Amino acid sequence: MMDFDKMNGLIPAIIQDNTTSKVLMLGYMNKEAYDKTLETGKVTFFSRTKNRLWTKGEESGNFLHVVSIQSDCDDDTLLIKVDPVGPVCHTGTDTCWGEKNEEDILFLKQLQDFIVKRHEEMPENSYTTSLFESGINRMAQKVGEEAVEMIIEATNGTDERMIYEGSDMIYHLIVMLTSKGYRIEDLVRELKVRHSDSWKKH
């Protein structure tokens, strides 16, 4: 239960991008703003300057769509993870600290989530579905084929085609991992272990 009484009816709400983990802004909520946020799925603050509820994006269209809400250990601060629409700051920057809200490497998690969803739903006329239906041998073959094509481009082709074929290889690798019940994060965990000073090659 959130403790709105501790700070005269207002609690700070830290807004974080669900995908990039960038902190986007800080606002304040009273009980009414908190309830409206839960009800609508769009972050609503209590504006101390306007002295009223204020849904972020009500004028600009740059809404903050709620993914999750967590309270801290004292129940007097919120961490709200969101999918933002457009820049967050009124100055036009991605965050209120002028940072770029970009973390390209985290797109791999989005791609992994997309492929998992394909595996669960198996929609017709989907290339990813056709790969799952083809079986593990075909999926493994595709990973190998794309790896060979990337090597050919790296040694005798162009950098542009090397990146293209490398992207194909990673995609097919994630499909194969998913079919075996694993995720790209499992490879990351293995790499982190190998990065430690105590790791010995098997």
Image (cartoon, rainbow, N blue to C red):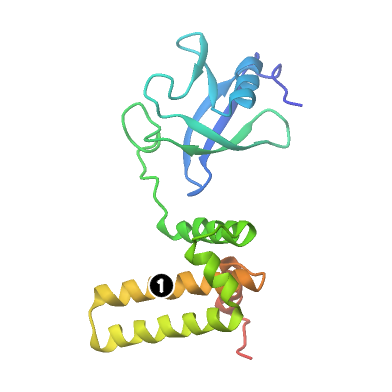
x 58%, y 66%: residue: 185
Q: Position of residue 114 (x, y in %)?
A: 53, 57
In the figure, 38 relative to 157: above or below?
above
x 52%, y 9%: residue: 52
Q: Position of residue 96 (x, y in %)?
A: 40, 33
Residue that sits furthest to the front in the current view: 124
Q: Nearer the viewer, residue 181 or 84?
A: 181
Residue located beneath label 1 in the image: 168
Would residue 147 be seen by someone viewing this image from the given angle?
Answer: yes
Residue that sits furthest to the top in the current view: 51
Kindly state the secondary structure of the residue where label 1 is placed: helix
**Quadrant of the frame with the N terminus:** top right
Mark 1, other Cα within 10 Å: few <14 / some 14–19 / many ≥20: some
Q: Position of residue 195 (x, y in %)?
A: 55, 76
In the figure, 80 relative to 182: above or below?
above
In the rendered image, which quarter is residue 71 located in?
Answer: top right
x 59%, y 56%: residue: 117
Would residue 192 be seen by someone viewing this image from the given angle?
Answer: no
Q: Position of residue 76 (x, y in %)?
A: 68, 28
Residue that sits furthest to the bottom in the current view: 202
In the figure, 198 relative to 15: above or below?
below
In the rendered image, which quarter is residue 134 located in?
Answer: bottom right
Could you tell me how many numbered marks the image carries? 1
Q: Amino acid at mark 1?
A: Asp
